[in-house]
Amino acid sequence: MAHVSRPAAPVVAVLVLRSRRLRLPPQDPSGHGQGYGGYIAAMPRPQARADEAPSDRLRAIESVIDARLARLDMETLLVELLDRVQEALDADTAAVLLHDEPSGDLVAAAARGIEEEVRQGVRVPLGRGFAGRIAAARQPVTIADLDRADVVNPILRERGIRSMLGVPLLAGDRLLGILHVGTLESRRFTEADVELLQVAAERVALATQARVSEVEREAVRVLQRSLLPDRLAALDGLESAYRYIAGGEGTVGGDWYDLFALPAGRVCVTIGDVVGRGLRSAVVMGRIRTAIRSYALEDHDPAAIVRRVDAMLQHFHPDEMATTAIGVIEPGQDRLHLTTAGHPAPVLATGPGPGTYLELPVDPPLGAARDARRRATSIDLPPGALVCFYTDGLIERRHVPLDERVDRLCETVDARPAQDVCARVMGALVGPESASDDVAVLVVRRAPAD
């Protein structure tokens, strides 16, 4: 499926501030104190002085790429980075606010010295206050006297901060957040100070982006494992099997599959793919899958189910798009009613093979068009018939015609046991190579007459 532009995944926000007036917990002689304070005390760090040359202060900032920092968790990493920034610029506070893209706010999530920033969940809208102006303009901003400035975070005034300097955190054209320092005494920051903080911002942005991506990838994997079924429902007269592998070097996307019983002996089978990758796609995938289950309880027409899911997606997630194939098997299991929304049609096998690519009406993907036409097609399922559902990651390969891949899939699918067909399909179409996209395969077979 062709990928389209979409909002980037949300970023967790972090705020860290440190004041000379605040003291860390006492350390023991070994350098291992209580909590993170013991770790900081044990770490050698550059000491900045007001009379230091710019090159000396720059070397202090360069220490933020210390290899030892790679072993730290996200919160501790940013604490250490900002502690070094604060020392290098001889400032009383140093802070990072990261951009929460869904809300558009800069949000506090971790703190050093004034933990109430996190406990109170400080949020600063873009364009408002000191931090918001930096983020909106993407330019450095200085404040010589905080008493005369527009500051939306009252904690800064309560802590007695007088002067501030801030710069944006950027990764290419993407705004990650802002980095700022402050002093308890009035100070006019120089051009050298601004340049030094911008160098620090580049290092902090690199470290932050890498760690946020790592945390997000793990969150997506956990979320998707919780959303996709650990096992398919055991249904009388039907056997099933599935395969799922994450493409893109292990990053998870929005592929899903499901099989469940409905009232009056019907069975629903569905597979689909949300455009894009990452946490947001996985969240949308979970909501679509839940919506399909809910609407299928109320209506056994797959076209009506798709219509309602499409309306839900366009109302609550207007910037998202997905493809899906939904089938409802009648109580006698001799008929399958199918609807596809921008999704590849399943392959049907009723004998030794090859299987047949089902020629179904091509309806638009979910989220692509309002009030799109949705049509269902009825397929005969004789005893022993098998239907192979899949996502586009199985059949799409660069420099290989799509028809050639579909033909190969049809040649592989026959009316053998579901587990055997799954294994044959993965061997023939994935083989030893790593998939660049997620691959989901769901095979459902009606029990043979004997």
Image (cartoon, rainbow, N blue to C red):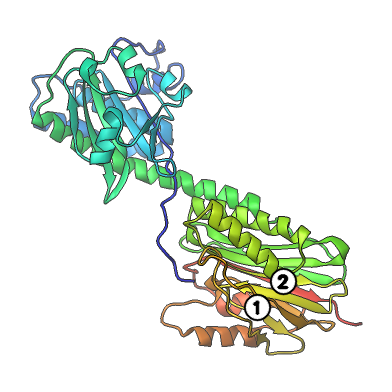
State the residue at coordinates (25%, 38%).
168
Say which quarter of the image contains residue 18. Answer: top left
Query: Please, is residue 53 above or below residue 429 in the view?
Result: above
Question: CA separation, marks 1 and 2?
Answer: 10 Å
Q: Is residue 62 visible?
A: no
Query: Please, is residue 224 above or below residue 381 in the view?
Result: above
Query: Please, is residue 108 above or below residue 367 in the view?
Result: above
Query: Please, is residue 113 above or below residue 429 in the view?
Result: above
**Do callouts 1 and 2 mark residues in contact (Cβ within 8 Å)?**
yes
Query: Disc 1 residue type?
Result: Pro
Farthest residue to the right: give it: 450
Depth check: give the residue in front, 297 or 97: 297
Depth check: give the residue in front, 290 or 70: 290
Say which quarter of the image contains residue 304. Answer: bottom right
In the rendered structure, the answer to whether residue 166 lies left or right of residue 379 reads left
Q: Pointer 2: what residue? A: 327
In the rendered structure, the answer to whether residue 340 lies left or right of residue 200 reads right
1 or 2: mark nearer the eye = 2
* Residue 117 location (% of width, % of height): 41, 22
Q: Dot 2: what SS?
A: strand
Query: Which numbered marker is on residue 336?
Result: none
In the rendered structure, the answer to whether residue 235 lies left or right of residue 287 reads right
Depth check: give the residue in front, 61 or 189: 189
Say which quarter of the image contains residue 348. Answer: bottom right
State the residue at coordinates (48%, 50%).
217
* Residue 160 location (% of width, % of height): 28, 12
* Residue 314 location (% of width, % of height): 54, 57
* Residue 213 location (% of width, % of height): 42, 47
Q: Pointer 1: what residue? A: 346
Query: Disc 2 residue type?
Result: Gly
Depth check: give the residue in front, 294 or 314: 314
